[in-house]
């Protein structure tokens, strides 16, 4: 293992075991609609998407293609950027460390997938939260603020320091899924444009 790889291996420490309480809530009817949709979405435990990412900071702009597939709880994210920047595969499996294999064949491992993606792209992309947000869900075990439309679709989530704005949804196999979302945190803006979704039959 390289010096860098040994340095990036970190352990996530969960502080507190009580369920977080939301700071704001939609009205009861729209919250019920949000929860009912969430249960339907969670039932599709196998899915894949293809998206384009656009990330901007105060000093630069960076774009990438993302192919993300989930099967039997295992997440595989293939990320490729212009001129090979950010090229690699991130694999997340239950009860295992995240594994990154770069386009050049380097292997890295860490408990925190966000740290691996930051190394790959030199930018902050919140994979740990996006596995939920990209489906219009709340990440578990984290405080949040939630705003929905009258049908219970999420329009704004604030969680883990990120503000997620949902701009557009498409119906996929009878389920409304995000196809346009913008994330912002401390001067970093991440735009996600999903070209296609596929859901496996639950």
Image (spheres, rainbow, N blue to C red):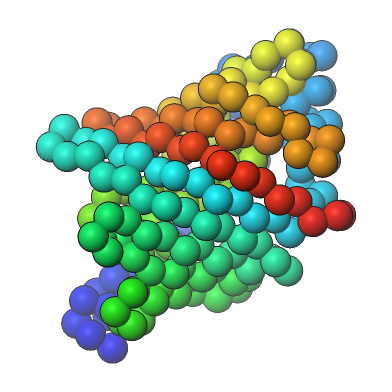
Task: Return the x and y of residue 154 as percentages of the image width and height.
Answer: 64, 24
Side of 30 relative to 79 (left or right): right
Taking the spot 31% from the left edge, 40% from the top edge, the residue there is 55
Q: Within the image, what quadrant is residue 186 found in?
A: top left
Residue at 44% across, 74% down: 99
Instruction: Kindly tell me whether residue 16 is visible in this rendering.
Output: no
Front residue of this view, candidates 169 and 145: 169
Q: Nearer the viewer, residue 17 or 174?
A: 174
Res. 153 visible in picture: yes
Left or right, 75 with reference to 170: left
Is residue 192 found left or right of 84 in the rendered image? right
Place of residue 101 in the rendered image (x, y in percent of width and height, measured from the top left): 39, 76
* Direction left: furthest residue: 59
Residue 200 percent location from the top left of the image: 79, 56
Figure check: 108 above or below 131: below
Q: Name the residue: 37% across, 60% down.
A: 80
Q: On the rendered image, what quadrant is the C terminus found in?
A: bottom right
């Amino acid at each position: 293992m390289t010096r860098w790889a040994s340095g990036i291996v970190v352990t996530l420490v969960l502080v507190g075991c009580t369920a977080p309480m939301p700071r704001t809530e939609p009205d009861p009817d729209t919250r019920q609609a949000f929860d009912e949709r969430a249960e339907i979405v969670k039932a599709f435990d196998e899915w894949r998407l293809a998206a384009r990412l656009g990330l901007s900071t105060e000093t630069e702009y960076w774009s990438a293609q993302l192919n993300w597939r989930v099967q039997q709880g295992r997440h595989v994210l293939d990320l490729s950027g212009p001129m090979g920047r950010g090229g690699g595969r991130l694999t997340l499996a239950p009860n295992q460390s995240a594994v990154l294999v770069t386009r050049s064949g380097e292997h890295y491992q860490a408990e925190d997938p966000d740290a691996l993606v930051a190394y790959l792209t030199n930018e902050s992309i919140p994979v740990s939260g996006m596995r939920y947000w990209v489906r219009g869900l709340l990440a578990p075990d984290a405080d949040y603020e939630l705003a929905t439309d009258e049908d219970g679709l999420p329009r704004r989530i604030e969680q883990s320091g990120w503000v997620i704005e949902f701009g557009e949804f498409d119906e996929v196999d009878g389920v409304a899924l995000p196809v346009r979302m913008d994330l912002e945190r401390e001067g970093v803006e991440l735009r996600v444009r999903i070209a296609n979704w596929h859901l496996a039959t639950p």
